[in-house]
Amino acid sequence: MNPGFAMAILRLTMGQRLGLGFAAVIALLAVITGYSWHQMGELEDQLRNVVVENNRQLETVHRLKEAILAEEGYLLRLLLADQPAKAQALARQVDAAHRSIAQLGQQLGGVETAQAKAQLLQALAGYNAEVMQIRDMLDIQDRYGATTEVNIELRQQRAGVFTVLDHMLAERTAMAAHAVQQSTASVAAARYWLILLGAATALIALLTAWRSTRAVVRDIGLDLDAAVSLAADLAAGRLRLAMRRNAFPAGSMMDSLLAMRDRMMDDWRYRKTVAGAAAISGRDKLVDGRTRQLLVLVDGQRPLSTLIEVFGETAWPQLRELEALGFIERAEFAAVPLPPEPARPHEPVHEAAGLVAEAV
């Protein structure tokens, strides 16, 4: 992948990445639909050629064979006709069969190749010439010569026509087999490309979902429900001191929420109430142990973070308990910067001693 393109993708917002990913999925689905439509159209054309056109030609070939055999049969019966009316009826049947042969020959010649058409027309011309010769012999009452022509010459001409028609049948059968092979290959290719495009679509969808989820987790730092719960706890004053900022990516929502918690701890200050001061100075020990020590250090100046640093995380529930007892209360505190004192480089010992005394 081009590094510049990758950087451009990384600079996109999460919404833009989602839009780009789903646009790619929709585009691939459109390609799949178009390709399927095109392949189905080609398969339809191939099946039409195989089923409709090829079968029509095969039917025409068989009808032509039947017409030739029928004409030959009518001629044989005409040779044996002993009544003028019967002979006229058979002559009409011979003429009808001859016209049918001519029409079917034209139909076949119109769709076959030039070579097959020439062979068919040549074979039919020889057959028709032999039929006309037999008819002329019957007109002059040469029944013996006509019978010889029917049994020998006409059958040879009919065999020549059938040879051409059988060759056409074989070519049509081969064309049908080739069309079936092409259809099978087209179906296999369509199946392959559909699987490939479907896999690419699924991969892009999964990649988009994974990248989006990863971006959400990175931006939030934790499960969204956990982040919402933390925000609700902070709003209610529950600080969740066990959570550490270093457990979450820098800049994430959880990091920001915990940074807000830390700022709250730096800004929150508690001071003693009158009851709290009395609890320390009175003889009745209303508070004991570490809680008393904590109450002593609550002076309205020390931030919550300092108290937690000194007493540990247990300071927070103790402070909440003291607040519930009415011994301490939240104090509004605003740090006012003091004017800087002039430097006294000649008194480093006195300065250090003052800091120590202040700490004590």
Image: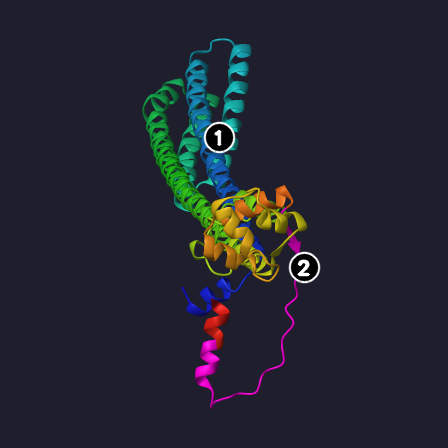
Above or below, 284 relative to 66: below
Q: Residues within 10 Å of mark 2 (few under 14, many from 20)?
A: few
Q: Nearer the viewer, mark 2 or mark 1?
A: 2
Cβ–Cβ under 8 Å for marks 2 and 1? no
Using the rendered image of the protein, determine whether residue 252 is visible from the camera's viewpoint: no
Q: Which mark is residue 332?
A: 2
Is 30 in front, or is 239?
A: 239
| Residue 341 forms part of the magenta stretch | yes
Disc 2 element: loop
**How far across and how far down the image is residue 1, in percent?**
40, 64
Dominant SS in magenta:
loop
The alpha-carbon separation of the residues under discs 2 and 1 comes to 100 Å
Magenta residues, start to end: 327-353
Q: Which mark is residue 56?
A: 1
How many circles with numbers are drawn on the protein? 2
Q: Is residue 226 magenta?
A: no
Residue 193 spot, x, y in % from top left: 42, 45
Mark 1 belongs to which amino acid?
Answer: Arg
In this orientation, does residue 50 appear?
Answer: yes
Residue 94 drawn at (x, y percent):
50, 21
Which residue occupies the foreground of this view, 124 or 342?
A: 342
